[in-house]
Image (cartoon, helix red, strand yellow):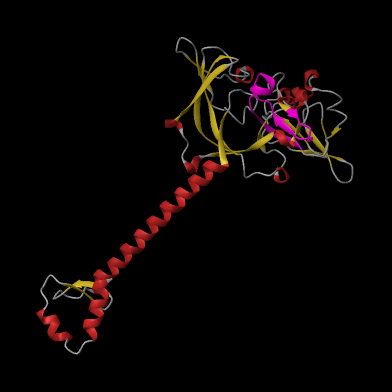
Amino acid sequence: MGVFFYARALRKAPFAPIICRMAKENDVIIASGELSALGSKKPSKTRRVLGLIGEILMLGVFTLVLSVSGQITYNYTRYSTFFVNGMSMYPTLNQDVYRIDSTGKREDKSDSAIYDWGNFDKSNYTYYCDYGMFDAKGFKLENLQRFDVLVTYFKDDMILGSDGKYTPKTKANSGTEPDLKIKRLIALPGETFRFDSLGDLYVKDSSGQFVLIEQSFLEDDATVKSQTVSPNSKTGTWDSLAGETLGPDEYFVCGDNRRKGGSTDSRSKGPVPGEAIQGRAVTIIGRCSFKYYSAESSEYHPVWNSYIMPWNLRWL
């Protein structure tokens, strides 16, 4: 700043030309708003244009880095990760699942046997399964839509407090800590719905008529869909053929694997309260390895080299 004000004073002084001629070659002054050495030529127009372009590019890179880092920070505070250690959402999730047995042999799915793998609880087997992100803080219950994929607890995983609200059980208050489940939202609070004998979904509209709702995510297999109304699919007073009306804070969730025993969900556990829903699944971003040791011990590790590139993410 001292050089700047000194230079401006020199330029306005009547004897400025004399002083400038006396200045040494390596002295630096400010001329016409540019920093230059005394005696040097004024930068050419081309150099000035290139310099301006360089400044714009550097500013763009800085803005991009700042935006990306801010977005990443925001994402990691808003989103949480999940892994799918079971086949209840097949064929939507774990489409390419495989497992390694205790001898190191790889076992891939056959056309139908994959439905029957169930939870990945075969001891000393390593399963390679889907790994994704869910919106844990930004979602709102009132914004949920039919067929959203949710990360949730069941009602019996929760404790009803004196304030009338549910909170997840913990080891401290129940001796066990329930696992989160991933299911598809089928019916919303206050709706009356039913499944027919083929597993098709009907929801009562404002005129009181049941309207068919297409379930495009299901495999077009009558055997698979018909399992929706198998005897072990009912709970309490829910009658899948006659229809059931949900309460003001009840959400009916199902797995996409509708074969008998393929998914434990609201058909046997009942609707889930709003407090049980922990987030909405957003995307599958890669694979992870999951190994089951016992009911009290298991572990998973993201497989970093199998992460999906941003332009090829599987959105849910």
Residue 307 in percent (x, y) is at: 46, 34
Q: Is residue 47 left or right of residue 213?
A: left
User: In the rendered structure, does residue 176 fall within the stretch colored magenta?
Assistant: yes
From the viewer's perspective, is residue 54 above or below residue 249?
A: below
Instruction: Name the residue at 71% across, 31% down.
Output: 167
Magenta segment boundaries in residue numbering: 159-187
Q: Residue at 26% of width from left, 74% of height from top?
A: 4
Q: Assess whether residue 109 is covered by the magenta stretch.
A: no
Q: Is residue 207 left or right of residue 140?
A: right
Tell me residue 158's x, y (percent): 72, 28
Which one is nearer the viewer's eye here, 233 or 246? 246
In which quarter of the view is residue 48 placed? bottom left
Query: How many marks are shown on the rendered structure?
Result: 0
Q: Residue furthest top?
A: 103
Residue farthest right in this picture: 208
Residue 90: x, y in percent?
A: 63, 27
Seen from the viewer's position, the closer of residues 22 and 156 is 22
Image quarter where the N terminus lies is bottom left
